[in-house]
Structures are given as C-alpha cells and as structure tokens.
Amino acid sequence: MFLTHKAPQLLWPRGDEKDWAYLLGVLCSIPLDWYSRRFVETNVTYFLLNQFPVPRPPRSNKSWQRTVELAERLAAADKRFGTWAKAVGVEYGALQDDEKQDMIAELDAVVALLCGLTEEQLAHIFETFHEGWNYEPRMQAVLKHYRHIRS
C-alpha cells in the first residue's frame, strides 16, 4: 500500500479499543473540530494531524472514561460494532434521536473540560464555528452538561 502525505493513517503500536474510542471521541467533538478548521482547508496532512491538541489524561480520569463510553456508544450503531462495544463495555444498537443528541452534547462538554476550556471559550467556539448556523440549542445543551460535570 502506498500512502501520500495527504492520506494520514493512525497506527497503534500499543493501546486497546478504549484508547481508540477515546481518540474517536476527541476527534469528533466540537472543540477539536473548531480547532482543526482554523488550520485545515481541504485535507488533513500529517503535519496538521500531529499538531491537534488531544488531551492525554490518565485512564483513571473520569472524563477520559466518560469520553470512551460516549464515543463508543455513539459509534456502535448496530451489531457490526458488537465486538468493539463489548471490549469497551457498552451496548450497541440504534439510539433514539433525542438520546443521541444528548450524548453528543455531553461528549462536547466532557472534551471541552479535558481541553481546559472555560464556559466563555466554549461559547465562543459555538458562536464562531460556522457562519449562519443555529448553534443556540446545541450550545445550551452542551453548556448544561458542562456546568453539571464541573459542579
């Protein structure tokens, strides 16, 4: 297989399914998406990918653990993900839309806390994420989780 600079792949010399789920959760969060959009125009190169600020708390950190749970549950949409879901310790299957949206909001909040973001910085991310989108409902859902986790 030949890969170019514009086709980065992640290799796992160590780690397990929980590590994969953690990274998936961080990469799929609004905070990291917002950050990446500041530098990425058309594709993610190795140089850019290596610069992404992925928090690295210990596995014993409750926010690390919750990121793993949320990311895996959101990703495990059907039985194709059963083995991975079992390795992480979550169920698989379709989620109701409101449950799914709530889990996405919680994931954004947990990652924001892992990144050390303040409530004002998190609000700024939503306000500047994409011109013209109705961010208020999602931002309020994320801030609700953020405040609850912080307290």
Image (tube, grey):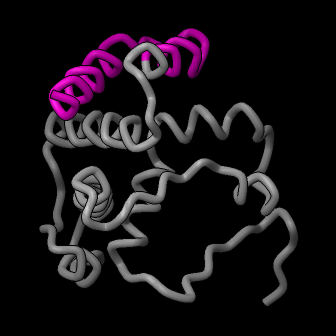
Q: At 71% across and 52% down in the image, what residue appears? A: 51
Query: Could you say where residue 61 lies in the image, as x and y percent from the top left?
Result: 27, 57
- Residue at 77% across, 52% down: 48
Per the image, is 126 magenta? yes
In the rendered view of the protein, which quadrant contains the N terminus? bottom right
Asked which quadrant contains residue 21, the reply is: bottom left
Figure disc tally: 0
- Front in this rendered view, residue 13 or 59: 59
Instruction: Measuring from the top left, give residue 62's x and y in whole percent.
Output: 22, 54
Quick check: 26 above or below 103?
Answer: below
Q: Which residue is nearer to you in this view: 109 or 118?
A: 118
Left or right of 53: which side holds 151? left
Quadrant housing the C terminus: top left
Tell whether 92 sits left or right of 7. Answer: left
Region in magenta: 123-151
22 part of magenta stretch: no
Q: Nearer the viewer, residue 64 or 24?
A: 64
The quadrant holding residue 148 is: top left
Residue 10 falls in image quadrant: bottom right
Q: Residue at x 18, y 80 (%)?
A: 86
Left or right: 45 as drawn, with respect to 110: right
| Residue at figure coordinates x 43%, y 13% from the top left | 120
Give the main secondary structure, helix, strand or loop, of the magenta stretch. helix
On screen, 20 above or below 107?
below
Decide: is 73 above or below 133.
below
Please state if 112 lies on the left or on the right of 60 as rendered: right
Q: In x, y percent, where is residue 137?
A: 30, 15
